[in-house]
Image: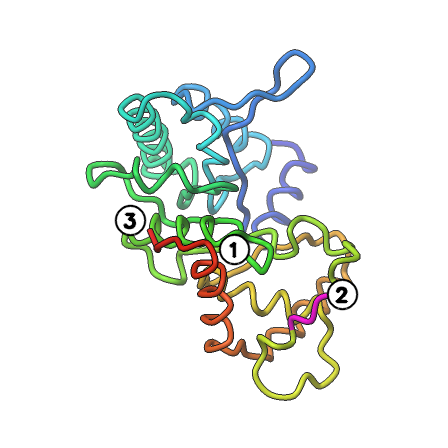
Amino acid sequence: MNNRSRHKKRRLSRFTLSTKVGFFPAAGRAEHSLDPGRLREAMEQTNRDLGRAPDLVFLHNPERSLTGPPDAARDALGMACAALDLAAAEGLCGAWGISSWDPRPLPGLAVGSMPRPDVLMVRGGLLAGIDVLEASEALAARWGLCTAQLWGMSPFGGRASDPLWGTLDPQVFIEGPDDGLSALQAAFRTAYWLPRVGRVAVGTDDSSHLRELVDALRYEADARNVRTYRQLPRERAGCQPL
């Protein structure tokens, strides 16, 4: 190992690192695969690139490759989970999880004999549909995951700069006076309850935006208003929880 590699490894050791596997380069595009061999190769390559094992590896959007008959989809998901579980046991990562943009197909496929992820990361926040929120909670319950093991992502629907956030008033979901709380801060804090999660993942390329969101953690969400918000679309659609 040369000096540059040693320096890189020392720097990376100061951070908790997570990554995702599931998408692979193809001719002019990216393709999704749950093939256990490809997932294993990707994790080995990640270890070589980082010079260390990542702390957490997510199986990225498994639903993309689970469009076949239920039995085949269940087998494919089970084998992919087993590949990550074995990789974690062998030290290729500290833990593993599932990151799903659309978890609705997954609760019916997660069976008791399937390895259980350490973390489930799902889309959340005020722009996530009620069906997505309930599928996320159903999947977490199926695997017996606690709030700390359920993470949220994309709390602003993918774009914090969307003009929508200049017209909505998410402060209604925050306890106490707003005290200068911005709409983005209120939406971010509320996302911890839609669904109920222990962490919310956001981009880190804008330090001022990140600082604004961290400052929002001193506020608390109004659980009663959040419950009312979740109940309204269900009543309007006449649907029942999963």
Name above or below for residue 19 compared with residue 15.
above
Of the two numbered discs 3 and 1 on the same chain, state the one appearing first in sequence: 3
| Residue pictured at 53% horizontal, 37% vertical | 20
Q: Which residue is mark 1?
A: 152
| Residue pictured at 41% horizontal, 44% vertical | 97
Q: Which mark is residue 73?
A: none
Q: Nearer the viewer, mark 3 or mark 2?
A: 2
Disc 2, SS: loop
Disc 1, SS: strand
Measured in 3D between alpha carbons, the distance from the residue under mark 3 to the one under mark 1, in whole angstroms, is: 17 Å
Task: Classify the position of the N terminus by image quarter.
Answer: top right
Measured in 3D between alpha carbons, the distance from the residue under mark 1 to the one under mark 2, in whole angstroms, is: 23 Å
Q: Is residue 6 magenta?
A: no
Q: For the stretch drawn in magenta, what is the main secondary structure?
A: loop
Circle 1 packing at 10 Å, graded few (<14), some (14-19), many (20+), is many
| Residue pictured at 29% horizontal, 39% vertical | 110
Measured in 3D between alpha carbons, the distance from the residue under mark 3 to the one under mark 2, in whole angstroms, is: 38 Å
| Residue pictured at 52% horizontal, 65% vertical | 192
Q: Seen from this angle, which residue lies furthest top?
A: 27
Residue type indicated by callout 1? Gly
> Where is residue 107 drawn, in percent x and y?
33, 42
Of the two numbered discs 1 and 2 on the same chain, state the one appearing first in sequence: 1
Q: Quadrant of residue 213?
A: bottom right
Q: Which residue is mark 2?
A: 167
Circle 2 packing at 10 Å, graded few (<14), some (14-19), many (20+), is few
Of the two numbered discs 3 and 2 on the same chain, state the one appearing first in sequence: 3
